[in-house]
Amino acid sequence: MIYPAISKLVDRTGTRYSLAVLTARRARQLGMQKEGSFSGKYDEAILEAIGEIESGKVKAVPSLNAMLND
């Protein structure tokens, strides 16, 4: 079983697409901040990003264009 559950993370971001994009962006930021302390693998950065999304430290914010088109 995957922890945390994807459905719980999707509730925080709104859509699976937003979850994927937010996780990838945050993992990239973490990888750049740590300057290679992840030993070339981003698995650790991805897990850290997922943990931050679950805890609410990182949140998905809709773009201005998306809000104006609704």
Image (cartoon, helix red, strand yellow):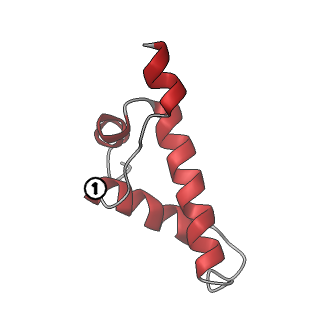
Q: How many marks?
A: 1
Q: Residue furthest right?
A: 40
Query: What amino acid is at disc 1?
Result: Gly
The quadrant holding residue 62 is: top left
Quadrant holding the C terminus:
top left
- The answer to which of 56 and 47 lies nearer the viewer is 56
Give how far across and how far down residue 68 sits, in percent. 46, 19
Above or below residue 40? Residue 5 is above
Residue at image coords 49%, 36%:
18
Above or below residue 66? Residue 56 is below
Residue at image coords 38%, 50%:
2
Q: Which residue is mark 1?
A: 56
The quadrant holding residue 43 is: bottom right
Residue at image coords 56%, 71%:
30
Give how far across and how far down residue 20 sits, in percent. 54, 42
Q: Residue furthest top?
A: 70
Would residue 56 appear left or right of 22 to someone viewing this image?
A: left
Above or below residue 65? Residue 13 is below
How crowded pointer 1 is (Cα within 10 Å; few <14, some 14-19, many 20+) is rated as few
Residue at image coords 36%, 48%:
1
Above or below residue 56? Residue 13 is above
Callout 1: helix, strand or loop?
loop
Give how far across and how far down residue 16 sits, in percent. 47, 32
Give how far across and how far down residue 40 sits, in percent. 72, 77
Would residue 62 appear left or right of 26 to someone viewing this image?
A: left
